Amino acid sequence: MHWNLFTWRNYSFQAPLHFLALLERAWPGSPSHAADPSAPGYRGRARNWAWPGLGVVDRPPRSLKPSCRGEQRLWRRWRVSACACSVLHFPGDTGTSPVPASDPSQCAWRCCICQEVCSRSRSCSAAVTLPGSSGLCQPATLRSNWTNYMWLLQIFALLFVVYLIYWLIDRMNNEKLEMKDAWWGPGSKPSTREDESIRPFKVETSEEEIKDLYQRIDLTRFTPPLEDTRFHYGFNSNYLKKVVSYWRNQFDWKKQVEILNKYPHFKTKIEGIDIHFIHVKPTKPPAGHKVKPLLMIHGWPGSFYEFYKIIPLLTDPESHGLNYNQVFEVICPSIPGYGFSEAPHKQGFNTVAAAQIYCKLMSRLGFQEFFVQGGDWGSLICTNIAQMAPSQVKGIHINMCFLDSSNLYIFGSLLLGRWFPWLFGFRKRDLELLYPAKKILHSIFRESGYMHIQSTKPDTVGCALNNCPVGLAAYILEKFSTWTNPEYLYLEDGGLEKKFTLDDLLTNIMIYWVTRSIIPSQRFYKENMGQGIGVQKHSKMKVFVPAGLSAFPYELVHCPESWARKKFPYLCSYTHMAQGGHFAAFEEPLLLAEDIQKFVGTIKGK
C-alpha cells in the first residue's frame, strides 16, 4: 500500500499537520520532519520521515493523537469533508499545487494553535496550504508561550467550576428557614397587637357530651368479617365489638379527664389561633444541676397524651432509677388542628408554619435555648425548628427520620447495600431491617393507603369519621396495631392490648372526638404533601445542630445511621433500640427516656 502522510483518505494518520509543528517546538534541533528537501531525512514527498527516537519511518506512529479539542474537531472535519482534495503540501514541499476542492467553502477552517482563520487575504512563505484555497496560516505564531500551559488553565478552570458548584450547594444547605409574618385566624389580620397572655386551661366534659356519644355508639351497624382474615382487611369487626362494648359500658371518660388534668394545661394565641400545651416542671430539681427545657411534639394519629408516661421519667428521673443529672421541664403542645389547639382557618398550614408558631411559643415562655424531640409529624416539625432557629435549639432528638426522597445516595445504597454493606456504612441490624427490599416495599404500600386519601381529599373521609365514633375508633386504632408491630396483622385482636390498655387507647380517641379535630388533623397531610413529596425547600436543607436518633425496629421506615448523617451532619447519638415501633413514647417510655438522656449527656460531654 502506498503511504502518503498528506493523503486525506489515509485514515491511519490521526493527527492534524500542525500537531507536527508542536513536536518541532518540543524537540528543537531534532526535527520531526524534513521541511527542506535538502535537509537530512527528506526522502521525497513525505514517503519517509525522520522521527525522534524511531529513525527514518514511512509513516508517523499510530499512537500519535490530536493534542487539543480543536485538533480533534479539525481531524474529524477532514475525515468527513466533502472536498475532493487528495494532497496537502507541507512547508518547504516543492511538489505541485494541491488539487482544488469542488466546494472550497467547505474547506475553511480555524487553526486551534494559532487561532487564525485561513483566507485568501493572508499568505506566508512557510505555511500549510489548504486544498481549494490559497489562504495560508502562519506557523511563526503557531503557539505563544502561554498556550504551552493551556491544559493547566483548563484543569484549574474545571476545578474552580466544581468548587463554585459545591460552594453554592453548601451555602444553600446552610440557609435558615425564614420566619415570616403569618396569620391563621379568621378574616384578615387586625391592626391591633395580638394578645400574648398565657391562660390556664382545663379539660372538661359534660353529661350531654357523653350522652350524645352513647347514642351514636348504639346506632352502629357492624359488618361481619371474612373467615380467617384477622387484621388483613383492616380492623377486625369481631374484636371491634369488644372494644365498643368496653367503651360504652366500662370506660370512664370523667376519670380519664382527671388524669388529663394532672398536668398543668395552658393556652395562648399565636398568629391568630389558640395554641394548647402542657408545661410540666420538676417537683424536686437537683441541686447544682440546670433544668433543661424540652419541647416534645406528637404526630398523627396521636396527641399530647402520648407523652403522659414519659413525662415523669424526664422531670423526676431519680424516682424512676434514671440519671438524676439530666432533668427536664417538658412542654408538650397540640399541633394546630389537633386536640385542644385551634385549627387554622386558611390554607397552607404545614410543618414549617407549625415550627414558626412553636419558636414563638418557646420565646414567649422565656426560653432562649431548648431541646426538641418528636416522632411522626413531630419529627419533621422539630427538624424545621432546628432549621429555623439553630442558635436556639441546643439539640434535636427524633425517633423517626424524614429524608430527601430524591437523594441518589439513598436510592443507590438501597439497591447495592445488600451486597456491599461496608460501602454504605450499613450494619448487620440495618440489613435485617432493610431487606428483603421487596417485603419492605410491600409493607410501605400496604400501610400508606390512608396517606394517599388524606393528602388528596381529607374532608371526604373526615366527614364520615367526624360523625361516627365507632368508625373513628376503628380508623385510628388500626394504626396503633400494625404500626406498633407489623406481625400484629396476624392476630385476631391486632395485638392492641400487648402494649397499650384500652383506657389509654380510648382516651386518645376521645381527644379527637370531643374536639372534632379529625378533619383538620387530616388536612395537615394535604398541606404538607398535596404538592408532592420532597418538593419543599426544607426537604433539601440539612440540620446543623447536634442530633440524636432512636431507631426502633418496627418503625414504618428504617433509617440507617449513614442515611441520617446526610440530613444531620452533627449526629452524635444513634441507637438501635431493642424493641418498639412507631409510637415510641406511648409504647416504650423508659427506653426512649434513657436514650434522650444519653443524647443530652453526649452534647454536654462535648
Image (cartoon, grey):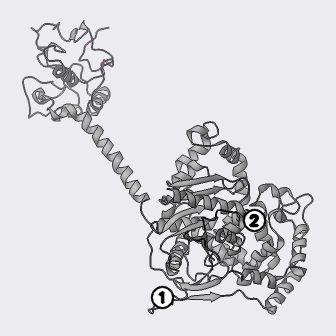
Q: Residue at x 66, y 63 (%)?
A: 593
Q: State the predominant SS element of the stretch in magenta.
A: loop
Disc 1 residue type (three-letter): Lys
Label 1: few (<14), some (14–19) or many (≥20) C-alpha neighbours in 10 Å: some
Mark sitting on residue 511: none
**Viewer-closest of 492 and 457:** 492
> Does the magenta-highlighted stretch encompass residue 4?
yes
Residue 274 belongs to magenta span: no
Per the image, the residue denoted by label 2 is 479
Q: Position of residue 117 (x, y in %)?
A: 16, 35
Secondary structure under the numbered disc 2 in the rendered image: helix
Decide if residue 307 is on the left or right side of residue 3. right
What is the spatial separation of the Cα atoms under label 2 and label 1, in whole angstroms?
A: 38 Å
Report the residue at 55% width, 67% height from top: 371
First to last magenta residue range: 3-13
Instruction: Tell me if residue 439 comes above or below residue 388 in the rendering.
Output: above
Secondary structure under the numbered disc 1 in the rendered image? loop
Q: Position of residue 273 (x, y in %)?
A: 56, 85
Q: What residue is shown with label 1? A: 189
Q: Quadrant of the N terminus?
A: top left
Q: Quadrant of residue 71?
A: top left
Foreground pick, 198 / 229: 198
